[in-house]
Image (cartoon, rainbow, N blue to C red):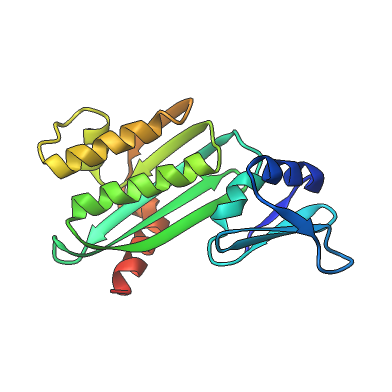
């Protein structure tokens, strides 16, 4: 349940500009509330609390855009191909801003890695970051995206195109291969997703 410390009047303006209906609060302590999808934002004097199953639906609008984030991604498949899952984490100097984990059906390890990277980039874009530093433990995916390796598989080539389109959303970006232990949170989230299948 994200808590966003902010100017609640400015946050209300951002929501209304995004087409979200803002209503009066339900209690004396609530300044206003707004809902979109499976998320509800409740404003108090100096903070907004986001509740529900998909807080990202509102959180990205409420947080002031810009700034720099570190983005970690990981995907995997049991069986290659087999039941697959992805995990990603968006981190700033204030700590973890957002993370996600989901099953993606049957896929290869490389397909899952690309899906994780795409989901991570979409989250960073939705949160409005200008500059991202992306890290993953798949050397193949990192080198394919950076153009150091060819992408012969048509499905992976299509995903690489999607990644490049998403990267154009940012003023600056880097993509770096890191050891698995540096990517441990995204790795754990991907494994949690695979365990659910």
Is 108 positioned to the left or the right of 25 in the image? Answer: left
Residue 159 visible (yes or no) = yes
When asked about the image quadrant of residue 80, the answer is bottom left
Is 119 positioned to the left or the right of 28 in the image? Answer: left
- Which residue sits at x=41%, y=47%? 120
- Which residue sits at x=83%, y=62%? 30
Residue that extends furthest to the right in the rendered view of this protein? 28
Relative to 56, say whether 139 is above or below.
above
Residue that extends furthest to the bottom in the rendered view of this protein? 196
- Which residue sits at x=77%, y=41%? 10
Q: Which of 113 and 166 is in front in this view?
A: 166
Relative to 4, say whether 14 is above or below.
above
Residue that extends furthest to the top in the rendered view of this protein? 171
- Which residue sits at x=62%, y=36%? 65
When asked about the image quadrant of residue 142, the answer is top left
For the C terminus, the image quarter is bottom left
Residue 188 in picture, x, y percent from top left: 37, 63
Relative to 152, say whether 48 is above or below.
below
Is 133 positioned to the left or the right of 56 in the image? Answer: left
For the N terminus, the image quarter is bottom right
Q: Which of 105 and 79 is in front in this view?
A: 105
Residue 56 in picture, x, y percent from top left: 55, 54
Residue 166 in picture, x, y percent from top left: 38, 35
Residue 43 visible (yes or no) = no
Q: Disc count in the image?
A: 0
Residue 99 in picture, x, y percent from top left: 48, 56
């Amino acid at each position: 349940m994200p808590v966003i410390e902010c100017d609640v009047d400015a946050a209300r303006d951002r929501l209304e500009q995004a087409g979200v209906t803002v209503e009066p609060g339900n209690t004396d302590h609530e300044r206003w509330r707004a809902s979109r999808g499976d998320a509800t934002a409740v404003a108090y004097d100096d903070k907004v609390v986001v509740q529900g199953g998909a807080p990202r639906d509102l959180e990205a609008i409420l947080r002031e855009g810009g700034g720099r984030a570190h983005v970690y991604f990981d995907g995997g498949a049991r069986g290659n191909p087999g039941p697959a899952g992805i995990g990603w984490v968006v981190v700033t100097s204030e700590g973890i801003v957002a993370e996600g984990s989901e099953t993606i059906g049957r896929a290869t390890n490389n397909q899952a890695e690309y899906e994780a990277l795409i989901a991570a980039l979409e989250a960073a874009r939705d949160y409005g970051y200008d500059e991202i530093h992306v890290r993953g433990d798949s050397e193949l995916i990192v080198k394919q995206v950076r153009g150091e390796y060819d992408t012969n598989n048509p499905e992976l080539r299509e995903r690489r195109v999607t990644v490049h389109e998403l990267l154009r959303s940012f003023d600056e970006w880097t993509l770096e291969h890191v050891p698995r232990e540096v990517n441990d949170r995204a790795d754990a989230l991907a494994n949690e997703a695979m365990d659910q299948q």
